[in-house]
Amino acid sequence: MLLTADIRHYAPQACFDRHDHHQLLIATSGAMAIDMEGRESVITTARGGVVPAGYRHDFEVSEQNSSIVIDLGHDPYHWRQQGWQKLEALFEQPQYFLSNPALDHLLRFAAAELPRHDKASPLAQHLAATLLISIADIGANTATKTRLNMDAINAYVDSHIAEPIRVADLARLQHLSPAHFQQLFQQQNQESVYQYVRQRRIEQAIYLIEATEQPLAEIALACGFAHQSALTRAIKSHTGLTPARLR
């Protein structure tokens, strides 16, 4: 039965693959955007991917990436003989998993040892089996509960409040594609990215109006509004008051 584990190095590229064996991968450095037939995420040192046999997976590497890759033949009878029944659920569908401290320790050991051995050597196969069972124990579905880091998003928006802010820039902070980021953002915040950014701009503008003597035209530009009249409309829509009434 096919069972191998090795470290693979990926140069910047956009490509796709499909194979008749199962595959599991997690980065040891860098990141890889991946789409497994509509399930999008980014493979990092903290998030791995499970690719069942036969599923197309499109991937994109923008910088150098190295990943632990485990290839496993689909052989449920052999799995049961080895006591690996958990793997049937693990490879039932494309999914992602999040690492934890115990798995991190094992991954660091694998990253150090695998380059020194053939990918089908007894040690590599033992590491592959141990990693697979450990990840099956974690439960790959935990990655579907991924929450956006709103502290990082808030900090980015506040520090770029005077500039155009693109969804792609915010998505990059979270190592997600723009489409996946927008979907998670809407689910987590019950508002669109556009609504959220506009609200942050209005809140900052109101603070400056109330706390400083800056001219309204300057505040408008400092908060990312095209001109003073755009600021006035936004604040009146939000508070029912004009900026002048807030001073």
Image: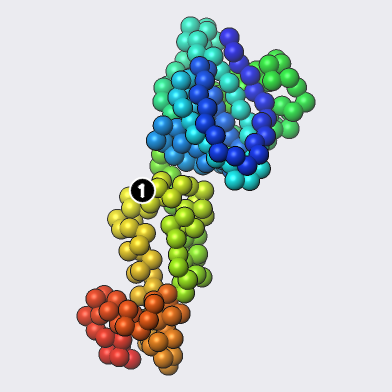
Would residue 45 be found to the left or right of residue 178 on screen?
Answer: right
Quadrant in which residue 200 is drawn: bottom left
**Residue 83 in view, yes or no:** no
Quadrant in which residue 32 is drawn: top right
Quadrant in which residue 10 is drawn: top right
**Residue at image x 52%, y 27%?**
17
Give the x, y percent position of residue 157: 46, 66
Give the x, y percent position of residue 132: 55, 24
Q: Which residue is mark 1?
A: 183
Quadrant, the N terminus: top right
In the image, 180 versus 104, the foreground residue is 180
In the image, 163 versus 99, the foreground residue is 163
Give the x, y percent position of residue 205: 38, 80
184 above or below 101?
Answer: below
**Residue at image x 39%, y 73%?**
201
Q: Residues within 10 Å of mark 1 (few under 14, many from 20)?
A: few
**Residue at image x 62%, y 22%?**
128
Q: Amino acid at mark 1?
A: Gln
SS at badge 1: helix
Would residue 119 be found to the left or right of residue 197 on screen?
Answer: right
Extreme residue in the right direction? 116
Quadrant, the C terminus: bottom left
In the image, 196 versus 228, the foreground residue is 228
**Residue at image x 48%, y 6%?**
77
Give the x, y percent position of residue 160: 50, 70
**Residue 217 in view, yes or no:** yes
